[in-house]
Image (cartoon, rainbow, N blue to C red):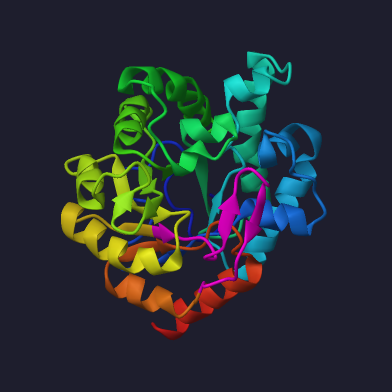
Amino acid sequence: MAGSDPGPAPGTAAPGALFGPEETLVLDGGLSNQLADQGCDLSDALWSARLLADAPEQIEAAHTAYVRAGARVLITASYQATYEGFAHRGVGREETSVLLRGSVELARRAAGGRPGVRVAASVGPYGAMLADGSEYRGRYGRTVRELERFHRPRIETLAAAAPDVLALETVPDSDEAEAMLRAVEGTGVPVWLSYTIDGERTRAGQPIADAFALAVGREDVIAVGVNCCAPADADHAVEVAAETTGKPVVVYPNSGEHWNAEARRWHGGSAFDPAQVTRWRASGARLIGGCCRVGPTEIAAIAAALHDGG
């Protein structure tokens, strides 16, 4: 990274080097809601990943909006970008590889050489490729080995683009988490593991303590936690993640609205309170932001709350 605080060399950071011993980093918010606010049509099955090919300047602009709001970790637009998903649109493997690597470059450009701004390459779950809401259920009928084979090519391509960290995110099922952790082995890039949960269980129904325990003893896993969940569920999850693993915690919940997969729209009101972040930090959270329907305004409030809280 350019600037007075270069941080780790991309792709070669030692585990834990993403942040300092006493440092808390503000993550960005939901990429899709910011793109929608910019006027982008996300009705395609590829969701925001379509814009990697059709309107990359919009993705860069969305990242830039979060940097201006105070985000210090930008999560790439590769959540729903897969070889299989692009193949359904007639995009070949070589071009898909270019688009995946480009997702990291777009975030780097948005960082603009600002000191301390990192890039997390998003690795979404298998269900995200299906585009039918199954990332909120898990239990796809796939074995761990099959899921590992699905994830490995994309992970290897993203790792080769030299992000600061791989974000294994919105994972609904500890079986898939096991597959993803196998797939990152040998990449040399640190990772965080983040589940989507419902109450005290993963979306697939496993106790969250058991799910978090997969990260115990894994030096490449620099943080573990939750995202794409209700803000109220995050409070307990942060405590359990810290107690179970002894690792820093990553937490970035939704606004509290609910996604209707059939209608492909959100409903309900926001329950996101930026004041919660000081409790999360006190419980061990070191990477804090927002997911779906949390925008630059809320990220700016999170940054302010963390700053005001010391």
Residue 43: quarter of image: top right
Residue 292 vs residue 206: left or right? Answer: right
Residue 216 visible in rendering: yes
Picture coordinates of residue 72 (x, y %)?
Answer: 53, 61
In the rendered view, would you say 61 is above or below 71? above
Q: Please report the bounds of the magenta region as a residue range.
A: 251-272
Compare residues 244 and 172 and report the one nearer the observer.
172
Residue occupying image coordinates x 60% and y 44%: 261
Q: Give left or right: position of 236 versus 58.
A: left
Does residue 179 lie above or below 199 as drawn? above
Q: Which residue extends farthest front?
A: 262
Nearer to the camera, 254 or 198: 198
Number of numbered tags placed on the structure image: 0
Rendered location of residue 283, percent (x, y): 27, 70
Residue 220 in picture, x, y percent from top left = 29, 39
Residue at the right extreme, as displayed: 39
Q: Is 180 left or right of 229, judged from the image as shown?
A: left
Which residue is rendered at x = 60% and y = 32% of the image? 81
The image quarter containing residue 241 is bottom left
Confirm whether the magenta stretch covers residue 123: no
Q: Which secondary structure type mostly characterizes the magenta part of the structure? A: loop
The answer to which of 147 and 300 lies nearer the viewer is 147
Image x and y of residue 262, in percent: 64, 43
- Image quarter (top left, top right, bottom left or bottom right) of the C terminus: bottom left
Name the residue: 46% across, 28% down.
Answer: 155
Which quadrant of the figure has residue 142?
top left
Q: Is residue 260 magenta?
A: yes
- Look at 67% across and 43% down and name the residue there: 106
Q: Is residue 169 visible?
A: no
